[in-house]
Amino acid sequence: MPSFWKDLSKPLFALAPMEDVTDTVFRELILSVSDPESLHILFTEFTSTDGLCHERGRVKVMERLLVSNQEKELLKAMNVKLVAQIWGSDPGKFRESATFVTSLDLFDGIDVNMGCPVSKVVKKKCCSALINYPELAKEIVYATREGTDLPVSVKTRIGFNRVITEEWISHLLETEPEAIIVHGRTQKMQSEGLASWEEIGKAVQLRDTKGSQSLILGNGDVCSMEEARTKVRDYGVDGVMIGRGIFKNPWLFSSDTQSPDQKTKIDLMLRHLFLFDQTWKGEKSFNLMKRFFKIYLNGFPGAAEWRDKLMHAKDYPDVLLIIQELQNQSNIAT
């Protein structure tokens, strides 16, 4: 199967996979306010290979691989690619999971998570812990490729307890993944400190020296398309993945550089809440939505009061009542 990684024009811009964030609802919302020239690739939340390889476990994790009909239509219309990210430590389960994910006929690629720094997964010898086990990591990439005809990529970091960019990326380049997405922090750093784009640049130079065809994308501390394009220019990466920057501006992948007004922000928040309510119908806790309020309710007088009141909302109808009350007080047109 042809690889979209090679076919799409460069540079590539992607939204990072984020736990309890990049479900089908959020991806659809971001697609609806983005331009295809600025957004090329989306990722699912990371999905356990242990879960996918057991009947009861599969039922629990399948919501992470849900793609709504509305999202499918937007992906097709905008030619944006969707990649399923999987994690674990058993190569055989990666192979089996890759075969299952491919059979869903929903995804354009599979990504192997070798970057998540959370201790509960690291303790299981998974994700960023694989940096300490390069032979196992390589076996996992090979096994994943054996299970699918979709292009396989890897998202990782520049080290575990210390920076070992060139040593670690050399191991990954041996497996010739279609792309390596490099987050410029070690596992030990978690999300603290500044991401080192100099180290990401070293990964690019190493790739070029080895004559590898793998693409290198950088990730870390990018909050605008202007910053993303600057990183491409300065460090030679084939593209940039943006994660937490989307929390500062959901319109990040739009060509409209004007800051949205209060009504526009509130309207998008209400759409997000509606989609969440209609898609999950109580299967996911409404409290998950509360982390998004700060995205929309900022930059206008009384925003903190709005956030405080909405944090006490119990469900979608409750939010609508509170919003109506606040809009009446503020004379904001609906």
Image (cartoon, rainbow, N blue to C red):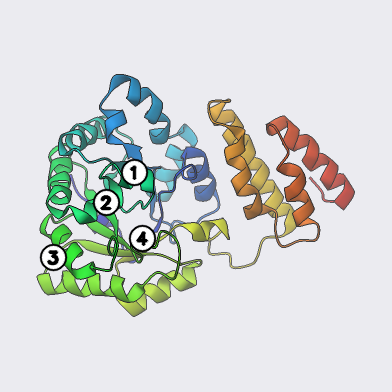
Q: Nearer the viewer, residue 131 or 279?
A: 131
Marks 4 and 3 in Cβ contact (< 8 Å): no
> What label sits on residue 129 in the rendered view?
2
SS at circle 2: helix
**Amino acid residing under circle 4:** Lys
Residue appearing at x 17%, y 50% in the figure: 137
The vertical placement of 53 against 214, above or below, is above
Q: Which residue is mark 3?
A: 212
Taking the image as shown, residue 130 lies to the left or right of residue 15, namely: left
The vertical placement of 292 against 261, above or below, is above
Q: Label 3 to label 2, Cα distance in Å?
A: 25 Å
Q: Label 1 to label 3, Cα distance in Å?
A: 30 Å
Marks 2 and 1 in Cβ contact (< 8 Å): yes
| Mark in the foreground, 3 or 2 | 2
Q: Quadrant of residue 104?
A: top left
Earlier sequence position, callout 4 versus callout 1: 1
Q: Quadrant of residue 177?
A: bottom left
Q: Which residue is mark 4?
A: 188
> Which residue occupies the extreme bottom position in the image?
234
**Amino acid residing under circle 1:** Val
Where is residue 56? Give x, y as percent: 34, 20
Where is residue 277? Give x, y as percent: 60, 31
SS at circle 3: loop
Q: Which residue is mark 1?
A: 121
Earlier sequence position, callout 1 versus callout 3: 1
Residue appearing at x 38%, y 55% in the figure: 40
Earlier sequence position, callout 3 versus callout 2: 2
